[in-house]
């Protein structure tokens, strides 16, 4: 499957998001996405294939978010230091 990193995606609600980073965690792929029109709207979403289409689902589990957030933070920090 193609990586979505740095892609622009449109969710079912019609809002467009920029995919900032993706990570593989416990055999699943998660993306950190940023709303194009509202920089305060940042989400972590789960990537899955349904009926042959890529579907992004908001991660709402607080425990999973607690585990994923520092991983995204570290990846972005390493990229910033490399610039």
Image (spheres, rainbow, N blue to C red):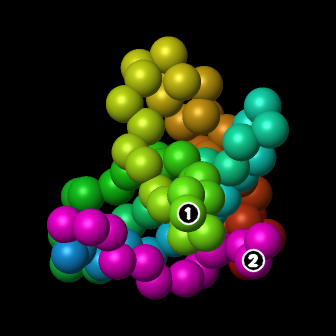
- Horizontal and vertical percent for residue 79? 72, 66
* Residue highlighted by disc 2: 2
Please tell me how many numbered marks the rendered image carries: 2
Mark 2 and mark 1: Cα distance apart in space: 17 Å
Circle 2 SS class: loop
Residue 47: within the magenta? no
- Horizontal and vertical percent for residue 10? 34, 77
- Horizontal and vertical percent for residue 64? 54, 24
Which image quarter: residue 62?
Answer: top left
**2 vs 25: above or below:** below
Magenta highlight range: 1-13
Depth-wise, is mark 2 or mark 1 nearer the camera? Answer: 1
Residue appearing at x 80%, y 38% in the figure:
27
Q: Residues within 10 Å of mark 2 (few under 14, many from 20)?
A: few
Specify whether 8 is left or right of 25. left
Specify whether 57 is left or right of 20. left
């Amino acid at each position: 499957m193609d990586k979505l990193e740095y892609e622009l995606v449109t969710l079912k609600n019609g809002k467009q998001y920029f995919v900032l980073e993706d990570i593989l965690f416990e055999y699943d792929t998660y993306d950190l996405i940023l709303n194009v029109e509202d920089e305060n709207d940042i989400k972590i979403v789960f990537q899955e294939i349904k009926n042959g289409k890529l579907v992004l689902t908001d991660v709402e589990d607080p425990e999973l978010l607690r585990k994923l957030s520092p991983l995204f933070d570290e990846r972005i920090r390493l990229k910033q230091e490399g610039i």
